[in-house]
Amino acid sequence: MTTTILEATGLIKRFGGLTATDDVTLAIRELTCHALIGPNGAGKTTLLSQLSGELRPTAGRIHFEGRDVTSADLGGRARLGILRSFQITSVCDDYSVFDNVVVAAQIREGHGFRFWQAPRGVRALADTTRSVLERTGLADFGDVPAGVLSHGQRRQLELAIALAMQPRVLLLDEPMAGMGPAEAERMIELLGSLRAEYTIVLVEHDMDAVFNLADTVSVLVGGRLVASGTPQEIRSNASVREAYLGHEQEDVA
Ligand SMILES: Nc1ncnc2c1ncn2[C@@H]1O[C@H](COP(=O)(O)OP(=O)(O)OP(=O)(O)O)[C@@H](O)[C@H]1O
């Protein structure tokens, strides 16, 4: 039994009269992949944005390793290791793939843009960058300008940028969106290879990916958490099927 690393308690987010997150209590266990699923508008992204620190909840608390981080902003949470991919740093099209990742590694090391740092530090950053590129299947693309990458490779680069920042918890919002089957398969494989080292919270509509990757699946409908369990439990949960009726029932079947 792994320990809880990230926990939401009684989380509520209102946008005017709309309750996008409605009293959600959720425990993310360390080194597991926890998928958030639900119909369009269920509040998945809103929940992820509160976990990342991008959105402040209207009520409720968020704890990371037992520490209350509710009032920590995006940057503060990133420093703790809670990182939403495709944020903090975004891809710079004119930079090479290598340079995009090295900048993220530099930010993590707190070097900022001080290019006069000691050569040993520069070498360490380059080593980190090479190993991250290797890890994300981009080892052969280091010199390529990011702007010419395919859509799938760009998502791999976005993931590489996140990994260079040495996250503990990776928050991923639809990493497979817009990908063809081959690209999606590659991304699923890549995320699968990260599961042993990182805690992953995954918002995803692609049920193949969800049932392939997730240790735990939580289902949101209308901002409320209606079920949480193993993929097998969720597949056979009658209220989940009910919730998806008229939405994506065939995906859950
Ligand atoms: N900044 C905002 N201001 C007002 N309403 C918002 C805002 N962000 C989200 N909402 C509303 O909150 C609800 C939940 O949206 P959210 O994007 O979290 O759902 P989702 O489950 O991620 O949907 P999808 O699967 O379509 O991406 C929706 O009704 C949406 O219109």
Image: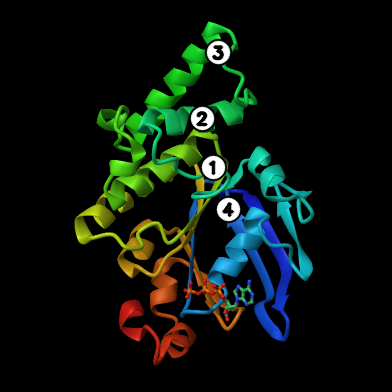
Residue drawn 64% across the image and 58% down it:
51
Quadrant of ligand 1: it is bottom right
Q: Are marks 2 and 1 in contact (CB under 8 Å)?
A: yes
Residue drawn 40% across the image and 31% down it:
132
User: In the image, is residue 45 above or below residue 89?
Assistant: below
Q: Quickly name the residue at label 3.
A: 121
Identify the amino acid type marked 1.
Thr
Q: Secondary structure at mark 1?
A: loop
Identify the amino acid type marked 4.
Arg
Residue 191 position, x and y percent, is 38, 48
- Image disc number at residue 103: 2
Between disc 4 and disc 2, the foreground one is 2
Q: Residues within 10 Å of mark 4 (few under 14, many from 20)?
A: many
Image quadrant occupied by the C terminus: bottom left
Q: Quickly name the residue at label 4.
A: 29
Q: Return the disc, 3 or 2, that comes first in the chain's sequence.
A: 2
Say if disc 3 is inside 8 Å of ligand 1. Answer: no
Q: Return the disc, 1 or 4, that comes first in the chain's sequence.
A: 4
Q: Return the disc, 1 or 3, that comes first in the chain's sequence.
A: 1
The answer to whether any part of residue 183 appears in the image is yes
Indicate the quadrant where residue 139 lies.
top left
For the residues labelled 4 and 2, the Cα–Cα distance comes to: 30 Å
**Residue at the extreme left of the image, as rendered:** 182
Identify the amino acid type marked 3.
Gly
Q: Are marks 3 and 2 in contact (CB under 8 Å)?
A: no
Left or right: 66 in relation to 102: right
Residue 33 position, x and y percent, is 47, 54
Q: Secondary structure at mark 4?
A: strand
Say if disc 1 is inside 8 Å of ligand 1. Answer: no
Residue 251 position, x and y percent, is 32, 78
Q: Quickly name the residue at label 1.
A: 89
Indicate the quadrant where residue 57 lies.
bottom right
